[in-house]
Image (spheres, helix red, strand yellow):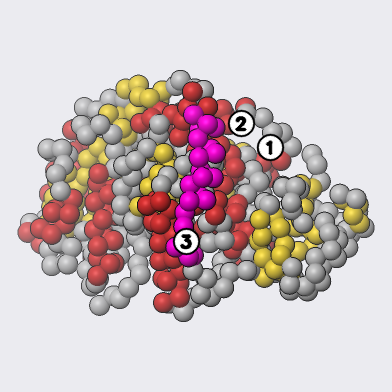
Amino acid sequence: MESYLIIHKKDSVAVALRDLKKGQTMAGIELAEDIPRGHKFALVFIGEGEEVIKYGAPIGRATRNILPGERIHTHNLMSLLKKNDYLPYENSVSARQQNQNSVSARQHRQQNAKKSVFFGYKRDNGSVGTRNMLYIVPTVGCINGAARALEAYGRSVLNNRADGVVTLAHPYGCSQTGEDFVHTQSILAGLIHNPNCGGALVLGLGCENNHIGVFRKVVGETVPDRVLYLNAQDVEDEIEEGKKAIRFLLDKLSEDKREPCPLSCLTVGVKCGGSDGFSGITANPLIGRMTDRLEGYGAKIIMTEVPEMFGAEHSLLCRAKDPQVYRQTIHMINRFKDYFLSNGVSIDENPSPGNREGGITTLEEKALGCTQKSGQAEVCAVLPYGGRAEARGLSLLYGPGNDIVAVSALAAAGANIILFSTGRGTPLGAPVPVIKIASASSLAVAKKKWIDFDAGVLLSEHTERYESNLEDLMIAAASGMRTKAEEAGCYDFAIFKTGVTL
């Protein structure tokens, strides 16, 4: 394996692929200090105030003179993002012209798309589930205990009638105001309408803001006998009544069988968490190539984590489908910056300590790696938090980078499977299957119970075989193979909170 990598010909830095020692010669340069794996060293003299280039784009500004062979990190590099750094609503003609350049490549992908199927559950509305789950949906956090008891009962009487019973426990549904209340309702309703939900028991208390009478209107029309409502204050024993509902729903779910479905029926969420210096080199670009394949198949792809687009917006704007999507993308990013500033948080309050330990210094650097999950796909839609993906191709979803909130939002938006890259590792799961992709082989080896796929091999071997291997794994998981998170019983769920709690 090589000892370092220069990602782009314009770069002024290289990335250490293993721990490098002071005095070693790399890229014709004698290293001035030890360089930990995943971290950067200067290829040229970089003067104080000059931009540092990685991925062919600026990732920050030098805070002092940096000599060739020196490590570049938080001690000598700062973000270029400013506290009031909003994107201008400039003319989008140039972006649309750039986007047209990718049309022929996209058509080529579509023409050469692999003809394949997965085995899923066809729903009455035309969507397809990769799982046949029974969700227990509390309308309010006060009823979580009863919901958990019913979840345990459901699992004890499952008898292969469904793929699982999961409670979407949360602390909200009452004492909420404005946008927060709407968010709670839209996310819960989105999960009920997710094609992986074969049936749902909505469990209410009775005195909450989000009481069943209100929430039922938000959920809207559902397939008869697949969504049941139970208000705990209206019955003598909500557990016994809930058990009856669980048995009824499991009998209904047992009627559903897997059938062959084209890959165009997939709705794939893409997410990264616990990123490191290799995430933007191996796992995220691999997911990006899968995004391109999925676009060619006519599937839906959803990407969120808006704060981790800051500094890399140009890579998305140049692929906007039309001027409206271009303006919506700018509005989405500026709105999230408003959210930061209104809470007294600097726009560049990122990366996390784990990101920095792994070699990521600035938000621009993190964003340039993060957005690679989108591949070269056309940005066809921008969704609000709690919105649902309708358009085929790549949709951007408003939401934070927080892992649990983000995967929950992807599932509520209709994702029936999620590709999740990680450099530091996480046991995270979601209400839908999550395929965890390691950016380095050392993580895949160390955390076999967490990681489904090793992208670290791409540091030394670059072939399309790994794209095909990941696609095969995705098809297997979509067809019922349990992911590592599912095997561990990890079905994490959380809702975005932005405002006042009464």
Q: Is residue 186 above or below residue 388?
A: below
Residue that carries the numbered disc 1 in the rendered image: 457
User: Hey, which quadrant is residue 457 in on the image?
Assistant: top right
Q: Which residues are magenta?
A: 87-107
Q: Is residue 232 positioned above or below 134 on the image? A: below
Q: Secondary structure at mark 1?
A: helix
Residue 243 picture quarter: top left
Residue drawn where x is 45% and y is 72% of the image:
340
For residue 466, what is the image quadrant? top right
Residue drawn at point x = 46 percent, y = 79 percent: 344
Label 2: which residue? 466
Mark 1 belongs to which amino acid? Val
Q: Residue at x 48, y 51 (%)?
A: 93
Three-letter code for the amino acid on which mark 2 is drawn = Tyr
Is 254 positioned to the left or the right of 51 in the image?
A: left
What amino acid does circle 3 point to? Glu
- Front tag of 3 and 1: 3
Mark 2 and mark 1: Cα distance apart in space: 9 Å
Looking at marks 2 and 1 on the same chain, the residue that comes earlier in the sequence is marked by: 1
Q: Position of residue 472 (x, y in %)?
A: 51, 27
- The x, y position of residue 382, in whole percent, is 38, 51
